Image (spheres, rainbow, N blue to C red):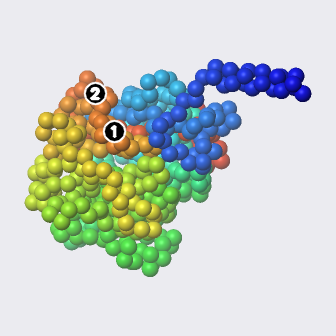
Amino acid sequence: MEMENSRRRRQLRNDDTEVLAAPPLRRRARFAVSTARREIHGDPLHRTALPPTLQGFFHGREVDDMPRQEFGQFASLLRTPAAPAIDPSFSFLTKVLPWTDHIFPLDSCNGLLLFGHLAPDSDDTPPELGYIVCNPATEQWVAVPGCGCDVGDDLGFIMLTTHVSLLFDPARSSHFHLVLFWDDLDIIDGTTLTTTVHTYSSRAGVWSHSEDDDWSEEERQGPLEGWRRRNMLTDCSSLCGSSRALVDGLLYLTLGRNWILQVDAQGKTRRIVPAPSVHADSETHVLFVGQSQGLLHCIVEEGFPALLASDDPRMRWSYGLSVWVLQGPDTQQWTFKHRISNLQLFGNRSYRNMLDYHVVTMHPDCNLIFFVQHRDAWMISYDIDRQEVRALQSFQHDFGPITLLDPITLTPYVPYLSELFLGVIGAHKQAVEVL
């Protein structure tokens, strides 16, 4: 018996030595990662202990009046090359698609990127706006045709009157959706603006339209869809430049200064949520909505009513931002999370209106907010938990000074390592021909 106990003690000591000698596990502090995300990130050949998180930002800039972006650069947030190598020039697309100068990023969602793509049908016809959805981690992509809107051949006008979002939630489905809003001005009275909704499902491979039989008359004329019909002289609310977020399979978009739309994958409005109420003696302006740690976050700009309410951003004066969290998809209740002063963010620099900076995104797994300072072209982060500001990267060398009216494009990227497009209609892997 004594010999057996001695053997067990020696074994325990050996086991302890092995544990102490083993390299420590790398953990991301304060990251809330759901079991569902652990399950779906990575096929058996690329399985990781934790799913990939925000890796960095693809960035580019409009270079002329055509919808075109210079891209091919990537601002990494990682200090080590732990993530899979990516090709920021997207050569797997540009080698096989026509009019490669006119491929431009529009959105990103859970590892997928949405591009607009201009391609002429023939030499004597204007180019048509279509879309590309791709996974940079696996170099898979699929072409999506235009939605069929009669938008004419004014490409600049097309970009101002359409707003398209990519919806992809791999915990729910391997298929993606596009939701496109198109503003159509009544040419007879010149004041009535009607927003039609167009949706694409990769499962069906076709577009659906709000004016078709897919929507009943009750749905088209319902009170929740009233925002889609407005008078331009009295209602300045618009989706142009709207931020967006996908939470629990629902799309959230900012509408004007004080409203947030909750829309499903069919483009139907499920809820209209008022902006958080901050102070009775102050005015707020919704700057951003985004998903972080599985919840919808809203960032609002606070300021004096007479100035912050101005439609001209150059006339708006703010004294800081506040961060709020929506408690659930079936509620309109906001919970206050944090307040940030301009002094905290920018020090003694006079960043007081939206021409000075914009919110890029929130980190999906922790309490980090990313901003771009326009005048000196710096990207900074703000850590809510530590109340710390960090300068991350300067774009001054690449782009020079930037403004809200002439911004760079920063597209957040979270790698998705699974073979996403298997079974999706028209999918390509290192394709050699155009759809």
What type is the residue that disc 1 sits on?
Arg
Q: In the rendered image of this protein, does residue 163 appear above or below residue 330? A: above
Upstream in sequence: badge 2 or badge 1: 1
Asked whether, in this view, residue 48 is left or right of residue 134, the answer is right
- Callout 1: SS: loop
Which label is found at residue 394?
Answer: 2
Q: Where's residue 404, x and y in %?
A: 22, 43
State the residue lying farthest toward the front.
2
Q: Where's residue 219, x and y in %?
A: 44, 75
**Front tag of 2 and 1:** 1
State the residue lying farthest toward the right.
1
Relative depth, front residue between 108 and 47: 47
Q: Quadrant of the N terminus?
A: top right
Q: Residue at x 13, y 35 (%)?
A: 348
> How far, Cα to Cα, is label 2 from label 1?
23 Å
Q: In the rendered image of this protein, does residue 351 appear above or below residue 263? A: above
**Crowding at label 1, few (<14), some or many (≥20) Cα neighbours within 10 Å?**
few
Res 421 visible = no
Which label is found at residue 386?
Answer: 1
Q: Residue at x 10, y 51 (%)?
A: 315
Q: Where's residue 322, x and y in %?
A: 27, 52
Relative depth, front residue between 67 and 402: 402
What type is the residue that disc 2 sits on?
Ser
Q: Residue at x 57, y 37 (%)?
A: 50
Which label is found at residue 195?
Answer: none
Q: Where's residue 429, x and y in %?
A: 60, 35
- Callout 2: SS: strand
Q: Residue at x 72, y 22 (%)?
A: 13
